[in-house]
Amino acid sequence: MKRRVRGFLLMVMLIAGSFAGIQAQGTVQGEAQLPPREWFILDPATDNVQGVSAEKAYNTILKGKKSETVTVAVIDSGVDIDHEDLKGKIWVNEKEIAGNGIDDDKNGYIDDKYGWNFIGGKDGRNVEQDTYELTRIYVKLKEKYGDTEAKKVKKKDKEEYEYWLKVKEDFEKTYDEAHQQYNFYSNLRDNIVRFHTLLKAYVGVEQISLDDLRNIDTQDSIVLTARNIIGMIYQNVGEDADFDQITQELDKAVEHFGNQVNYAFNTEFDPRGIVGDNYDDPYEKGYGNNDVKGHDPSHGTHVAGIIAANRNNELGIKGIADNVKIMVVRAVPDGDERDKDVANAIIYAVDNGAQIINMSFGKSYSPQKEAVDKAVKYAESKGVLLVHAAGNSSKDIDKGKNFPTKTYAGSKAKATNWLEVGASAWGEGEDFVGEFSNYGKETVDVFAPGVDIYSTTPDNKYESFNGTSMAAPNTAGVAALLMSYYPELTAFQVKDIIAKSSRKFDNLKVTKPGKEELVDFKDLSISGGLINAYEALKMAESMTMEKKN
């Protein structure tokens, strides 16, 4: 599943709190209170935001310095390769002649001019929604065990049966929660529209204001209820609340939970037939098609922009890396990505020259982890750096998994070419860590900007997203800078530099995600730090100078 937290969720929570008659803990910040749109590339000392200091690096260490082009593969939902701010930044397979129906470079993929799509069929159709991995495992094990009593289970099946009981409990609990959320937000949206329409008609205006509400004098219980609910929304969202926008935000929430109910948790839904592969063979190659955009490339386009948006065209935003190409590999649907596709996506990226692979996705179960591990080991053997988002479940992933993981199945050994990244915000204080971000003293390597990140979205648009999905490309962008300006560095050295050069904070207490307690920021990751391009490049400069001397 694309583990991102869109900006609309904050407003939705405030509205929900209003509807329930609960005083929200804060309000949607006004424009003046928000950080600069490109805060993630700015410097803590000069700009008063906790960015990665990329601009400072360009103005100092990198000034006048030559670079080499670095290829970053973005395994994601797809990328709008025609976006105005990504022109000239998309990897092109020069060995492939587009549209001739021939595998010109004989890499096993026909017409892969800009990358490949592992969730599409030869007939051009694409998987849009898919189930969660939990659902797929639930369906498979239910066929075998159903309502079987423990005493009737054979000894050789005991371990799998215990696993089935865990899966069953997890599935039923999360499905019920999704169904409740879907019903809640559907009713919330419908009632707010009804109340707002009622009040406009009652007062006789096209746009009702907070003053209009204050002047309503009636004993009608329905009008009073409507006035109280709409009034609390104004109080929490602000007097300039736009109810058309609020309805649109609630529509997104309804769609989000509706997709969970109708697709992700739907035991009758299986779109894999579209792909036409032998799904039981995790090592099968060559399936898919060359549609690298897909039906909704919003997430992947946003990720690509953080890494590579053109820094010199005075449009939109500046990406972190200035000499980089994005290889598009589509493997993430609306739902959980499949292990087979992830493994093949990694292998494709490595075989076609990617030096860094960004993986802004994750899930809680991985039935074919061995296939993914094999691909990770392959990338490791070829010196390719893997950057993975830690996930948005507000949990300690030292204890709860967020697959894929750098730890190999059945072993304590870990991939040496892997960076696991948590998400941070722009201000240094208790809210410094994204409230959604996963963390782990033994699992997460570093933190990077992942709150209110403004980047490219399809059709030449731009939006702010929140998530570790945004923190990972910030890190991949810094890694690309290091490899571009110091091409002699290996993936393992780049990983080491990013972790060691990360910015440390003395006695910084932050709210632990998902908890109402303060902890030391340094205890939420292995490095205890926030990535910093300027410091990383300084370290790289020192390392290369030492070698020359």
Image (cartoon, rainbow, N blue to C red):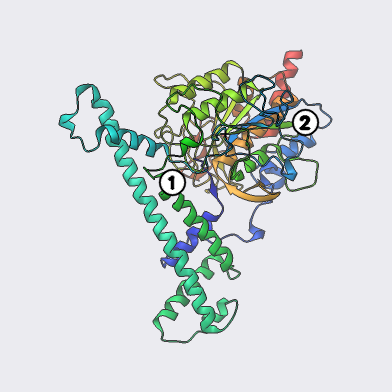
Residue 24, image x, y percentages = 47, 62
Location of residue 183 in the rendering, given as x and y in whole percent from the top left corner: 39, 59
The quarter of the picture where the C terminus appears is: top right
Q: Residue 187 occupies which quadrant of the picture?
A: bottom left
Q: Position of residue 258 (x, y in %)?
A: 44, 53
* Vertical side of 322 occupied by 188: above or below: below
Residue 61 image label: 2
- Residue designated by label 1: 263
Dot 2 alpha-carbon crowd within 10 angstroms: few under 14, some 14 to 19, many 20 or more:
some
Where, by quadrant of the figure, is residue 88 drawn? top right
Choose mark 2 or mark 1, whichever is in front: 1
> Disc count in the image?
2
Within-10-Å neighbours for mark 1: few <14, some 14–19, many 20+: many
Label 1 sits on a secondary structure element that is helix
Q: In the rendering, at what x and y percent does residue 77 appear?
A: 57, 39
Image height check: is 44 above or below 326? below
Left or right: residue 163 versus residue 63 is left
Residue 138's place in the image compared with 411, above or below, is: below
Viewer-proximal residue, 331 or 68?
A: 331
Q: Amino acid at mark 2?
A: Ile
Q: Secondary structure at mark 2?
A: loop
Taking depth in this image into account, of 378 and 260 the one nearest to the observer is 260
Q: What residue is at 57 percent from the left and 35 percent from the top?
A: 123
